[in-house]
Amino acid sequence: MKHRTVADVMTTDVVTVTTETRFKDLAALFVEQKVSALPVFGRNGTVAGIVRDTDLLKKEELQHDLSMGLGSVRPLRWRRGVHAVAVGSVAGEVMTTRVVTVTPDVSLAAAARLMDKHHATCLPVVACDGTLAGVVTPRDLLRVFLRPDADIRDEIFRDVLDNYLGTNPVLLDVDVRHGEVAVTGEVERKSMIALVLPLVRAVDGVVDATADLSYAVDDSHLPTAASKTPSWPIGA
């Protein structure tokens, strides 16, 4: 079963900045380009960091606190690092340097796990030579759920039922509506029934799945090859 990768959904026409891009220009790009994060290039041409629109808002918060007379007491929430970002005037001073990146061949599921783990809203996609190949956002990852129902149905028949399980697809019906799958009919062996739902749910674009299946052969009591005791001659 082939899963879609970051390369299938990433944005390749990326708006980027350098470490010297000024604060006001960053704000203009966020507003005009309608993006939430901007990769920052260092002098060597590789990704040095990433600036999020929320990073710029720290300056607004600091200015508000100063206007309220809180600047002199340095509130606890204005830790040294946060304060440095708030007073920064160029991208290199406000960017996040601990950037979580992915390569184009990473699966969409793995990219989603990284986003969730690191609370990231944008992952730069880096090629093997260290150059920026694109960016991937949560919105990009959601594209997999826009797959046509007919494409999902065809993949289940071809990759799950025929190629992987090896059961006769003619004896099965796969109904897909809005990404929700219902599999009915007969599989060859009883042991296949437990495999159907996990495999179907693993197909890209499937929202949920149910199965109502019968079987032709009950193989639950048949010994497997691994459980058979070898009949070696005595003394061998």
Image (tube, rainbow, N blue to C red):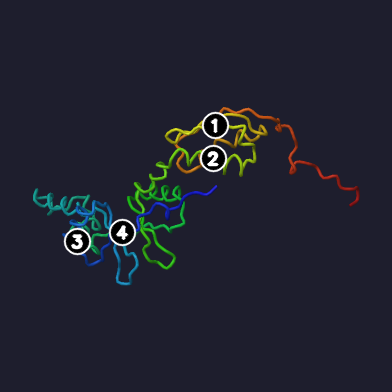
Q: Which mark is residue 10?
A: none
Judged from the image, the secondary structure of the residue bearing numbered disc 1 is strand
Residue that label 3 marks: 88
**Distance between the alpha carbons at the discs numbered 3 and 2:** 53 Å
Examine the image and state in which quarter residue 18 appears: bottom left
| Mark 2 nearby-residue class (10 Å; few <14, some 14–19, many ≥20) | many
Dot in front, 3 or 4: 4
Residue that label 2 marks: 156
> Could you tell which of marks 3 and 4 lies nearer the N-terminus?
4
Residue at x 48%, y 42% (from the top left corner): 151
> Could you tell which of marks 3 and 1 lies nearer the N-terminus?
3
Dot in front, 4 or 2: 2
Residue at x 41%, y 57% (from the top left corner): 102
Taking the image as shown, residue 230 lies to the left or right of residue 46, namely right
| Mark 1 nearby-residue class (10 Å; few <14, some 14–19, many ≥20) | some
> Could you tell which of marks 1 and 2 lies nearer the N-terminus?
2
Residue that label 4 marks: 14
* Residues under numbered marks 1 and 2 in contact, where contact means CB atoms less than 8 Å apart: yes
Residue that label 1 marks: 183
> Could you tell which of marks 3 and 2 lies nearer the N-terminus?
3
**Distance between the alpha carbons at the discs numbered 3 and 4:** 24 Å
> Could you tell which of marks 4 and 2 lies nearer the N-terminus?
4
Give the amino acid type for the residue marked by disc 4 in the picture. Val
